[in-house]
Amino acid sequence: MNDHQTHGEAAEGWQHKRQQLADMMRALAVHVRALRDPSDWTEVELTMPQVRALDLLVGNSLRMSELAAALHTSLQATTSLIDRLVDKGLVERTHDTADRRVVICTLTPAGLAEMERMYRIGQARFEILLDLLSEGELDTVLEAFGILTNAAHQLKRQDGAPATTSPGRSPVEPHEKVNAR
């Protein structure tokens, strides 16, 4: 904020930039989705809620109730969704040894492989865009993503949730700063 700018003007400017970024992120997602090859997604037919459930289970074994809460669905709807994923061989259910009423959901090797395939498809589409950038532009993007990653880790620490990663990637501990360069 400079000498001639009020707090209200500064807040308005910040809000405008935040909205610009949100709009740019939406536009980027649309453009990246347009790069997809429809044949990439035909091997295993999954609904978006099923993909979300699989994504939540990457690196985690969750109680059915935790999965329902994370998906914002009822326990009955989540059980039905998991039934379909079990039938596809992507998730397995086990019972907690301490309390047989508790059902634990875990990705099978096939489920993990499917999620890794989806991540690779997304990464390949994003790399098409990155190939268009100069080294200086790539440095700028790396710096920006480093800042956003650090902010995400701050949120995780505030929520007390563990840092998560994509398959094949090592976790960045919440106390470590991501070095953009």
Image (cartoon, grey):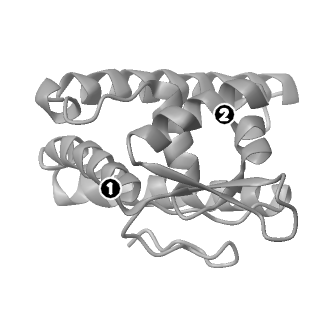
> Which residue, as the protein is rendered here, is positioned at the far front?
100
Taking the image as shown, residue 69 lies to the left or right of residue 79, namely: right
Q: In which quarter of the image is the C terminus?
A: bottom left
Taking the image as shown, residue 60 lies to the left or right of residue 15, namely: left
Residue 5, compared with residue 160, is above or below; it is: above
Specify which label sits upstream in the sequence, 1 or 2: 2
Numbered tag placed on residue 69 in the rendering: none
Q: Position of residue 39 (x, y in %)?
A: 12, 29
Question: Nearer the observer, disc 1 or disc 2?
Answer: 2
- Circle 1 SS class: helix
Which residue lies at the image location 55% right of the left edge and 73% below the top edge? 172
Q: Where is residue 27 in the image (x, y as percent from the top left)?
A: 37, 21
* Number of marks drawn: 2
Q: Quadrant of the N terminus?
A: top right
Q: Mark 1 points at which residue?
A: 116
Which residue lies at the image location 19% right of the left edge and 29% below the top edge? 42
- Circle 2 SS class: helix
Taking the image as shown, residue 90 lies to the left or right of residue 93, namely: left
Label 1: how many residues lie within 10 Å, few (<14), some (14-19) or many (20+)?
A: some
- Decide if residue 1 is in sight here: no
Which residue lies at the image location 32% right of the left edge and 49% below the top edge? 114
Mark 1 and mark 2 residues within 8 Å of each other at the beta carbon: no
Q: Where is residue 136 in the image (x, y as percent from the top left)?
A: 24, 58
Nearest the viewer among 66 and 36 is: 66
Q: Within the image, what quadrant is residue 94 found in?
A: bottom right
Q: Mark 2 points at which residue?
A: 79
Q: Within the image, what quadrant is residue 104 found in?
A: bottom right
- Decide if residue 34 is in sight here: yes
Residue 114, compared with residue 94, is above or below; it is: above
